[in-house]
Image: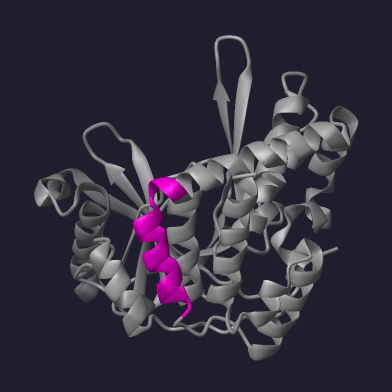
Amino acid sequence: MALISKKKKIYSISQHLRTYLRSQNRETELPLSYKDLLRYDNSIPLYDRFGADTLWETVFYPQSEMEGIYHSLKVIYAQLKTQGDLSIVDHLSIERVDLCVYGNTKPFRVRIVNNINDNFDYFYIKVADASRVYGLELEHLLSPNHINFVVHDQTLIEEHIAGIPGDQFIKKYLHEHTLNEIRLAKEFVKFNERCFVRLLGDMHSSNFVIEVTPDFEEVHYRIRAIDFDQQSYEGRRGVYMPQYFKQNNPIIEIGLRNMTPTTMRQYQREERTLIANRINTSSTTIKKLIRTMTMDELAPKENIEHLRTDLAHYYDDPEFEKCRNMGEILQNSLSLLLQKMKL
């Protein structure tokens, strides 16, 4: 079983990272910060449609401030979704603002409604932890998923990643007769490989969602990470491999029933080939990101030392032992991937 540190330090956005974000149009002026949303004067627990406590609270703002805060939230949504086209603001309304009270960083979630068709969407306002920002950008560059986020000062705005939460999927859908076990098992192997190669940790079932796409003959699955706080932080190799989290065991068991070791290695190689292709396609941007990462502090010294030793032994590659920080460890992981894919 993979073990996670009880509380991770929040790393502020450095000038190096801010320069990179500007080069990628990830930084923009915002009319409201995370701290502004802390000015609520009342809150109530939020329950789901079955009456269960979601561990989120809906917050309320003083009448004198609510109109200004809600307008700013609509402007932020326009900046996130339409590159600042404010013409959509008049058609939007804020249905509620929720605060996650159990998380380490206590994010806000905004539910916003399009008044023309009653369609709704969510977005999140969080403290801009550098680990998370690196995780989001690496997901955007190295996975099949596009990630939309912007940063200003120490505030991070993220779009909602739609899908069925992994823990709910396991409880409600894993035994459906329509479940395609082979496709789900294959996707989990590929997801496991993506996380390990780019060192994204803590991917137990509460931290990813599963997209289900019906096709004319079959059902397709894609597993998507939704929590990036543990990007290149922990010192144990197993934390970066979702297969070692007991919460994911029901999916692991499906894989054991449906795949041979040979098949699993084939899927791992397929995913590593896709990652290598993405690196080659966006090589300039990825090199710039990794170079920036090598200049930042992202983990305690003992985590760096333990992980580089662990990976040196796992890959039988002494180059890992020369790494001085998490950025260099990730750089070596990606370089090793490219070398092996050329064989």
Residue at point 53% right, 74% down? 327
The relative height of residue 259 versus residue 191 in the rendered view (above or below) is above
Give the farthest residue toward the front.
343
Is residue 40 in sight in this rendering?
Answer: no
The quadrant the C terminus occupies is top right
Q: Main secondary structure of the magenta part?
A: helix
Quadrant in the rendering for residue 216: top right
Q: Which residues are magenta?
A: 280-294
Which residue appears at 43% of the width and 60% of the height? 137
**Which residue lies most toward the bottom here?**
301
Instruction: Tell me which corner region of the image, top left, top right, bottom left or bottom right, holds residue 269.
Output: top right
Based on the picture, tell me whether residue 285 belongs to the magenta stretch.
yes
| Position above or below: 300 against 55 | below
Direction from residue 43 to residue 179 in the image, left or right? right
Residue 238 % position (x, y)? 78, 64
Magenta-drawn stretch contains 307: no
Residue 232 locus on image (x, y percent): 59, 71
Is residue 327 placed above or below 299 in the rendered structure? above
Identify the image's colour scheme: rainbow, by chain, secondary structure or one colour.
Answer: one colour
Is residue 267 among the parts visible in the rendering? yes
Point out residue 260 in the picture as x, y percentages from the top left corner.
87, 32
Quarter of the rendering occupied by the N terminus: bottom right
Residue 301, horizontal then vertical, whole percent = 65, 89
Q: For residue 174, what is the image quadrant?
A: top right
Return the residue nearer the eye: 235 or 85.
Answer: 235
Instruction: Residue at 12% x, 52% y: name it.
Output: 86
Describe residue 52's horizontal placement relative to residue 58 as left or right.
Answer: right
Q: Residue at x 77, y 19 (%)?
A: 177
